[in-house]
Amino acid sequence: MHELSIASSIVKTVLEEVKNRNLKTVTLVSMRIGALTDVVPDSLQFGFEAITKDTILAKTDLHIETISVKGCCNNCQHNFEVFEFVFICPNCESNDIKMSHGNELEIAYIEAED
Amino acid sequence: MPDKIAIEKKVLSENDLLAQELRTKFQENKVFVFNLVSSPGSGKTSLLEKTLGLLQDKLNIALVVGDVQTENDADRLIQAGGKLVRPIVTGGSCHLDANMIHKSIQQFNLNEIDLFVIENVGNLVCPSSYDLGEDMKIVLISTTEGDDKPLKYPGMFRKSSVMVVNKTDLLGFSDFELHKVKENARQINGQLEIFELSCRTGEGLDTWIDWLLEQVILKKKEI
Ligand SMILES: Nc1nc2c(ncn2[C@@H]2O[C@H](COP(=O)(O)OP(=O)(O)OP(=O)(O)O)[C@@H](O)[C@H]2O)c(=O)[nH]1
Ligand SMILES: [Mg+2]
Ligand SMILES: [Zn+2]
């Protein structure tokens, strides 16, 4: 639901890079989005296209890499992938789990021509 | 060939930064802050009305209340005796952000406040991404919703420290089962503190109030 405001933050950051680095065009923006962020990739794509229309980013592709949820057990230090959001250690069954991945909402890199 | 340029920047870094600033400010003033989230109509305002009624004489409580369109909830809290109540009308936005809180605290003297409550916009999705500088998120769920809510909105249940199950007076009028909602929530977040209560009958409110008072006192003792 707030994908539009996320899209506009992305655009803002990218335009700053364009200005600071004197870039001519940005061909790609690559994002990392954690599976627990509730951000819907399709909606983000849609929002990005909608707000970049008629701007210098109109032809820029948005690439979204979904990061799966990973946890680290506070009891036995076991690292594991969290399936179906079950935060229970497969090694010792503890439910005291620190999340190590899945909350990402970041711009990884852009591809640009100067 | 286009050049690849590493950016490595969080999309909400501005919000996170401001939230951190807020957290420091709350910390300096030893104010306990919680961010109350739920689906629309689960009973956030009702719980705050009851809380005001029971803690008003003991604590200085400030409340900021997010609503998409009206100031009704803020009016209800003033009716319930709230002296420091500020509405935030988001005008369409589905969540509060740190900037809105930042603006609203200008009107308060944090030094004189013991408990700072944020009622977020009724929504279990968007508010989970926005840090408001709170000590903890508290998620409310009512027995008229499905007991599988935690599974449908894992992000929010994972990020919350407490779950309040409200409307226990209505248990039995639907398929909602208390043990199931707890099981589902604990599977996502084994460390969740859970309260069961009814804002209508008052059942279970005492346990909630005791816990809340304890948090405020613990905060005061922090250095
Ligand atoms: N039966 C029953 N009804 C309740 C209880 N708590 C709240 N309600 C009713 O539920 C409705 C919604 O309560 P609110 O407190 O306005 O809910 P809210 O979460 O603040 O709603 P929004 O701010 O619009 O998202 C009201 O009609 C309340 O009277 C309860 O414990 N039992
Ligand atoms: Mg309300
Ligand atoms: Zn373990």
Image (tube, rainbow, N blue to C red):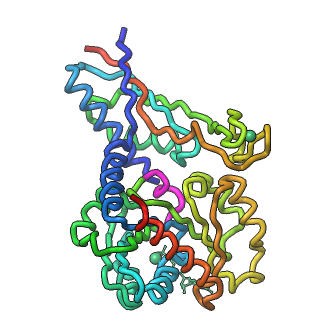
Whether residue A24 appears in magenta in the rendering, the answer is: no
Q: Along the horizontal axis of the image, is B76 left or right of B213?
A: left
Q: Along the horizontal axis of the image, is B195 left or right of A46?
A: right
- In the rendered structure, which segment of residues is drawn in magenta? B122-130
Which one is in front, B125 or B78? B78
**As drawn, B43 above or below A101:** below
As drawn, which residue projects farthest toward the top? B1
Where is residue B154 shown, x and y percent of the image? 62, 53
The residue under the point 75% across, 47% down is A94
Where is residue A44 shown, x and y percent of the image? 46, 42
Quadrant hosting ligand 3: top right
The quadrant in which the N terminus of chain B is found is top left
Q: Along the horizontal axis of the image, is B159 left or right of A91?
A: left
Residue A80 visible, this angle: no
The quadrant in which the C terminus of chain B is found is bottom left
The residue under the point 64% across, 83% down is B204
The residue under the point 44% across, 41% down is A46
